[in-house]
Amino acid sequence: MSLFRRRSPGHSPVEISERNDIRYLHLGGPAVQSAMRIKDPVALELEYTRAMMAFLLFHRAPSDIALIGLGGGSIAKYIHRHLPECRLTALEINPEVVAAARAYFQLPQDDDRLAVITGDGAAYVHGNPDSQDVLLVDGYDAKRIVDALASPDFYRACRAMLRPGGVAVFNLWGSDEYYPRYFDRLARAFGEHVLQLPAEKKGNIIVFAFRKPLPPVGMAALLRQAQRLEGLLDLEFEAFVSRMRNWNPSSPDTFIV
């Protein structure tokens, strides 16, 4: 059932649908960009959004997080609810997406811990070096990742945006023919300090990229942190660690040992 469809000049049309008590956001096509379980609106319904929260394995207490690509606001809502000591700045270029997130997905109004900016996320990253502990990038149009959010220059700007010891998180599609190219660009921009975490049920691959100094994390410590976080947040962090171990070679460069 379609609830809403609207388009801003120069942007993909925004459509809201609902099925089996789950509300979905689409951008110019049937692909699901965001989802919310109506009876549990703050929960992270899509697994890839839960996987993106695995940055907490590496940065336990971020003060400042930037999110590029709002969607229905799932990640923004979750961080606002569960990380009360953190300030989140979310960038979304399509004003209709922001309107839909607020009207249909219960995104809260801005306050001292949440700022939603309608604007160019790539320009924001370039213009704010050394400002964030965590950067989350999830910017897609109807068909693929936005080009401005996947260039070598953008990935270098992402690294520069992080404070020392920060982590950037990128949602990519493993089935995209350009995935190897994007991953290579990320690895080059971050000096090979990258980890891959594939989603279990869909084609998303979450890539974590780190600005030195690298977190001194071995497998035993990661598992302890995963168990602690799983108890606090009820997300499948232990499964995420297991998948990261399988997908990333054991070496000092990846610090998964």
Image (cartoon, helix red, strand yellow):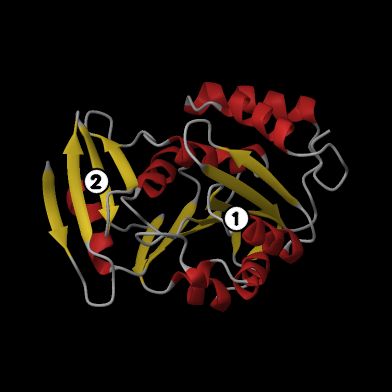
- Location of mark 2 (residue): 105
Q: Residues within 10 Å of mark 1 (few under 14, many from 20)?
A: some
Q: Amino acid at mark 1?
A: Tyr
Q: Amino acid at mark 2?
A: Phe
Q: Going by the picture, which residue comes out furthest to the front?
A: 177
Which of the pair 180/73 is nearer the observer? 180
The percent position of residue 63, horizontal first and vertical second, equals: 56, 53
Q: Is residue 108 visible?
A: no
Q: Is residue 145 shown above or below 78? A: below
The percent position of residue 126, horizontal first and vertical second, equals: 57, 76
Query: Where is residue 37, by image quadrant?
Result: top left
Between marks 1 and 2 in the image, the one whose residue lies nearer the viewer:
1
The percent position of residue 142, horizontal first and vertical second, equals: 34, 59
Q: Is residue 18 shown above or below 131? A: above
Which of the pair 44/192 is nearer the observer? 192
3D distance between C-alphas at marks 1 and 2:
30 Å
Q: Residue at x 50, y 28 (%)?
A: 235
Query: Where is residue 6, by image quadrant?
Result: bottom left
- Location of mark 1 (residue): 179
Q: Residue at x 64, y 75 (%)?
A: 153
